[in-house]
Image (tube, rainbow, N blue to C red):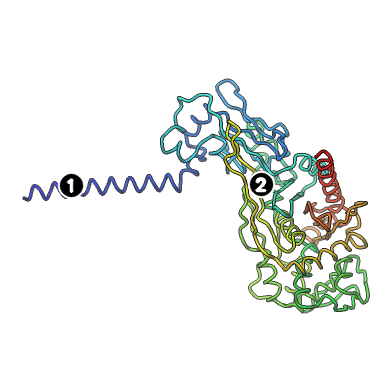
């Protein structure tokens, strides 16, 4: 009897260990497999890559942006457009691993799925000639190339979106880098130590004071509080709690309403509005616009910041003109602008349009989804009219396009160097067109570019004009 009990205990122990092993392996398979496969030190991945033609990456129109070719015994990743997509597609290196789309969609690009992992097919080195899935991005290559050209090597970013679907049409960051493995490995240390931060994706991870582009949200809050018809006396400057806030060049606009204040970008009026609206209203509109929240996207995005626990009058005034502690990414600013263009609804941003297996069968087709309702349609329609006036008669005149109604807002944001008079302010412009049926929304920032009306607005105009011409040509063909 005692012998039987010992045998039973041993069997129970062995079964427990076996069950624990099954649970552990199941956990690894379900929750850790993706990160383990992507790990640079995973030799299994190296074997898979040696025998797999990594999937191609295309733009929305089928332009080839990345592909693999056999170089001796190795698969070499080719990027035909060099640095242009380094902050979108990323890189694929045996030494430094993978980034961005190459990392996020590594399994798909290698043709690995849950079933192949379970049955061990993907890990075998006995299947030469395997092919991974192809990826189609939402990016329009023509717009991406134009954005890179217009930045002319200056630090900054250009983001363009379809406001109705959330599809990202251009996502340009500058400076960039050559993502080819040989060049990457050769220049890695120099780039890591560079003050220009070429690895920083400014479009998605650069955090900047939004300057006067933030006034479009303050305008929404003011309209909701019934302040759109108020008359303000703009004397060129105002002192709030011993902090003097001035208009650009100290210009005084006299008695003006909200529409005129947005058109001329009156800091005096909007500083007063910030105090009048109060902490609750400012935090509420920032929360609806998803400041401080993670943005679900195919590549990493920094969370924009509205980091005030309690706000003094100075905090309220500075925040209302997009200064102080408020920070935003260009992608997020493009999303907010898209939200106004889309009747107050901000869509989830999309970068990957679809996945296609080697036989041409679609594996995944991205669906548009609402991200946040920032404001009512009525409020957004009023802001559209005001933003159109910014371009027609205000600071955004350089974004005007003959025959097309453009809405926009300039921004000239102080930074750590401009405050010390060691550099110009950051140049911002956000906008969309056509006003009556928006097809494209943009956000442009040029670091130390000076006035938003002189630098960023011109870039935005050319992006909008190019895309709408493309759309018109496509419609005429059909």
Q: Nearer the viewer, residue 8 or 327?
A: 8
Would residue 314 be found to the left or right of residue 101 on screen?
right
Q: Nearer the viewer, residue 156 or 465?
A: 465
**For the residue carrying disc 1, how many other residues have a C-alpha within 10 Å: few (<14), some (14-19), or many (20+)?**
few
**Which secondary structure lies at badge 2?**
loop
Does residue 299 appear anywhere in the picture?
A: no
Instruction: Please give the residue where the numbered disc 1 appears in the rendered image.
Output: 10
Q: Nearer the viewer, mark 2 or mark 1?
A: 2
Disc number at residue 325?
A: none
The Cα atoms of the two marked residues, 2 and 1, are separated by 55 Å
Labels 2 and 1 touching (C-beta < 8 A): no
Instruction: Quadrant for residue 423, please give it.
Output: bottom right
- Judged from this view, the residue extending furthest toward the top is 72
Q: Is residue 322 above or below residue 240?
A: above
**How many marks on residues?**
2
Would residue 84 be found to the left or right of residue 400 on screen?
left
Would residue 71 be found to the left or right of residue 121 on screen?
right
Residue 316: % across, % down: 74, 74
Instruction: Quadrant for residue 284, please give it.
Output: bottom right
Which residue corresponds to the image point at 74% horizontal and 57% vertical from the top-left?
A: 338
Instruction: Quadrant for residue 144, please give it.
Output: top right
Disc nearer the start of the sequence (2/1): 1
Residue 430: % across, % down: 80, 57
Q: Is residue 72 above or below residue 291?
A: above
Does residue 169 appear anywhere in the picture?
A: yes
Q: Is residue 27 above or below residue 386?
A: above
Which residue corresponds to the image point at 70% horizontal and 69% vertical from the top-left?
A: 285
- Judged from this view, the residue extending furthest toward the left is 1
Q: Quadrant of the C terminus?
A: top right
Residue 142: % across, % down: 78, 39
Instruction: Please give the residue where the numbered disc 2 appears in the rendered image.
Output: 351
**Which secondary structure lies at badge 1?**
helix
């Amino acid at each position: 009897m005692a012998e039987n009990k010992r045998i039973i205990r041993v069997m129970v122990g062995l079964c427990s260990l076996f069950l624990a092993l099954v649970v552990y392996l199941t956990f690894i398979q379900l929750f850790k497999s993706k990160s383990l496969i992507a790990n640079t030190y995973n030799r299994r991945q190296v074997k898979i890559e040696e025998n797999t033609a990594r999937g191609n990456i295309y733009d929305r129109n089928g332009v080839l942006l990345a592909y693999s070719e056999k170089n001796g015994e190795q698969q070499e990743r080719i990027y035909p457009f060099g640095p242009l997509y380094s902050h979108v597609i990323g890189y694929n290196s045996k030494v430094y691993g993978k980034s961005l789309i190459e990392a996020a969609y590594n399994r798909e690009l290698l043709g690995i799925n849950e079933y192949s992992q379970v049955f061990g097919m993907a890990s075998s080195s006995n299947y030469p000639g395997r092919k991974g899935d192809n990826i189609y991005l939402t990016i329009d290559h023509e717009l991406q190339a134009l954005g890179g050209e217009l930045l002319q090597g200056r630090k900054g970013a250009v983001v363009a979106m379809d406001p109705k679907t959330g599809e990202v049409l251009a996502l340009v960051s500058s400076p960039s880098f050559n993502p080819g493995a040989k060049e990457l490995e050769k220049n890695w240390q120099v780039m890591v130590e560079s003050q220009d931060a070429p690895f920083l994706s400014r479009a998605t991870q650069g955090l900047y004071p939004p300057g006067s582009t933030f006034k479009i949200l303050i305008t929404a809050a003011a309209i909701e509080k019934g302040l759109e018809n108020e008359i303000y006396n703009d004397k060129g400057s105002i002192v709030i709690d011993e902090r003097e806030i001035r208009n650009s060049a100290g210009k005084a606009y006299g008695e003006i309403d909200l529409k005129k204040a947005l058109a001329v970008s009156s800091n005096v009026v909007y500083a007063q509005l910030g105090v009048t609206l109060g902490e609750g209203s400012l935090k509420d509109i920032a929360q609806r616009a998803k400041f401080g929240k993670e943005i679900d996207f195919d590549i990493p995005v920094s969370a924009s910041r509205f980091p005030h626990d309690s706000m003094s009058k100075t905090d309220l005034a500075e925040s209302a003109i997009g200064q102080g502690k408020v920070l935003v990414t260009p992608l997020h600013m493009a999303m907010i602008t898209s939200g106004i263009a889309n009747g107050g609804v901000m869509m989830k941003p999309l970068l990957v349009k679809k996945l296609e297996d080697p036989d041409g069968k679609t594996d995944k087709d991205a669906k548009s989804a609402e991200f946040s309702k920032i404001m009512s349609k009525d409020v957004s329609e009023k802001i559209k009219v005001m933003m159109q006036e910014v371009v027609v008669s205000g600071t955004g005149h350089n974004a005007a396009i003959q025959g097309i109604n453009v809405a926009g807002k300039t921004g000239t944001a102080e930074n750590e160097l401009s405050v010390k008079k060691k550099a110009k302010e950051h140049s911002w412009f956000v906008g969309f067109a056509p006003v009556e049926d928006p097809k494209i929304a943009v956000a442009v920032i040029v670091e130390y570019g000076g006035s938003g009306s002189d630098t960023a607005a011109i870039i935005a105009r050319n992006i909008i004009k190019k895309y709408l011409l493309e759309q018109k040509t496509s419609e005429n063909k059909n």
